Amino acid sequence: MKDTEEYSMDNQGKPMMFLAQINFEEMPPLEGFPEKGLLQFYIANTDDYGYDEPCKVIYIEDFEKDESKLLSENPYQSEIQENQPFEMECKITYESKEMAVTDFEGEFEEMLNLISDEDEDDFYDAFASGTSRIGGYPSFVQDPVECYEMGEKEILLLQLDVDDPSGLMFGDSGNCQFFISMEDLDNKNFSELAYDWACC
């Protein structure tokens, strides 16, 4: 952002917690998703990571790329509460990967017992879903989010899961997710998202 006026505020005019930013030009093309622009994720600055508060996701299709003309630090960092879901900033790297459907209803452990020890890592790579991702299938720590289960917001826009380098973790080994409808994604309308997080 170029100045503090562009920073997202909540309904009470207080600065929100900046959570993540996606640069679509840096990631492999993903069907249905924009091919350029930035997507910025903000949540309410509360002890429960904005659980019952509106989130804000801002799409910037064309943006200033000269970093010398941009703010290099969060102008409101001193006002953001200390209990953030991460310990340090971390650059997102992207890797395209196919995912298997992971809703096995208890069959995961049974399948794991059928494979050899040397194939265990490959099995987890193919079927275990506990990683951060854009698109794909969500990994629900607890019950599935109703809007996703009912097909109202059927696209996983972003999942942030436990990440050791940045200290990212929601609660006790939890993750957060943002969901969007296919129609809103097609129209690049990111104003009606569903945000949820859960932990063990």
Image (cartoon, rainbow, N blue to C red):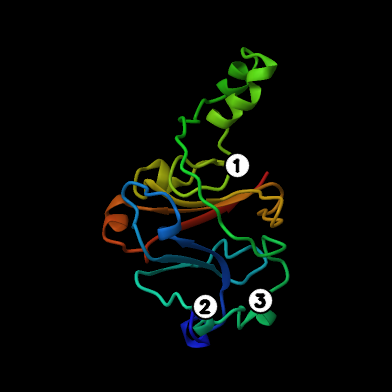
Q: Nearer the viewer, mark 2 or mark 1?
A: 2
Taking the image as shown, residue 42 lies to the left or right of residue 192, namely right
Badge 2: residue crowd in 10 Å (few <14, some 14–19, many ≥20): few
Provide the residue designation for mark 1.
141
| Residue type at numbered disc 1 | Val
Query: How far apart are the alpha carbons under marks 2 and 1?
Result: 38 Å
How far across and down, in percent of the image, does residue 52 sit?
54, 63
| Label at residue 80 | 3
Taking the image as shown, residue 61 lies to the left or right of residue 172, namely left
Residue at 50%, 31% in the rendered image: 102
Residue at 60%, 42% in the rendered image: 141
Q: Nearer the viewer, residue 101 or 70?
A: 70
Provide the residue designation for mark 2.
67
Mark 3 or mark 2: which comes first in sequence? 2
Q: Look at the picture and state if 31 lies above or below 87.
A: above
| Residue type at numbered disc 2 | Glu
Residue at 46%, 82% in the rendered image: 6
Query: How far apart are the alpha carbons under marks 3 and 2?
Result: 24 Å
Q: Nearer the viewer, mark 3 or mark 2?
A: 2
| Label at residue 182 | none
Taking the image as shown, residue 72 lies to the left or right of residue 167, namely left
